[in-house]
Amino acid sequence: MALTYPLDLLSEFPGWATEFEPVYRQEYSRQANGATIGKDFGSPLWRGVWTSRTLSPNDLDYWRARLEALEGVVRSFRAWPMSRCRPIRHPGSSALPAGTLHTISASRNTIRVSGLAGINLSAGDLLQIGAADLHRIMESAAGNPTGLFEVRPHIWPGVATGAAVSISKPSCIMSIVPGSIATAANPATGRGTVSFEGIEVR
């Protein structure tokens, strides 16, 4: 059976996301008069780092193959932090409702979502808008529709009200950061760990 991309790499990954944060595309410009001006070149991109527990030689080779299927930076995978597959206040495995983007403020960092009856969102939760736009929630929200609440990064250009909103395993699409894959084994036991880093691609 042919592999499909973005690859579902993390559903069975035997480890944890040790880092998952936005990378801001910014720089400082220092002028001759001593003034320092911050420049922002666009919305940040998500970056993640994943590390496995210690694996047997067979499992280590399996995960080497899974990562090689990405062909370095050529192929993509669906990415999320392992700690935030569901809202903080709704642990467990019960089905979660799907929502709809109800309102986008003029600043494009404040939204309202409908369809999430009975769900309480908290600062630190993640939600996915559309196929792959991942956002972190900045303040608590509840109701159907919810009250207005802020998210980061800002809503991407082109996204409009009516877009689907997911709070169950919200994700974005990443590719491997070159040179970040490490799969070294202990020469005495053959056991080892797998680690890799990804950066969002759009």
Image (spheres, grey):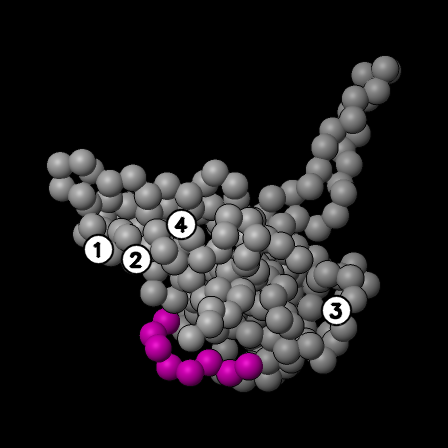
**Residue 65: where, in percent of width, then height?**
36, 55
Image quadrant where one finds the N terminus: bottom left
Residue 159: assigned label: 3
Pointer 1: residues within 10 angstroms few (<14), some, or many (20+)? Answer: few
Instruction: Point out the tag, 2 or 3, that comes first from the N-terminus.
Output: 2
CA distance separating discs 1 and 3: 44 Å
* Region in magenta: 91-98
Question: As displayed, is residue 162 above or below residue 194?
Answer: below
Q: Which residue is mark 4?
A: 50
Residue 62: assigned label: 2
Instruction: Point out the tag, 1 or 3, that comes first from the N-terminus.
Output: 1
CA distance separating discs 2 and 4: 16 Å
Residue 125 in view in this figure = no
- Contact (CB < 8 A) between labels 1 and 2? yes
What amino acid is found at the position of numbered circle 1 in the picture? Answer: Asn
Pointer 3: residues within 10 angstroms few (<14), some, or many (20+)? Answer: some
CA distance separating discs 4 and 3: 29 Å
What amino acid is found at the position of numbered circle 4 in the picture? Answer: Trp
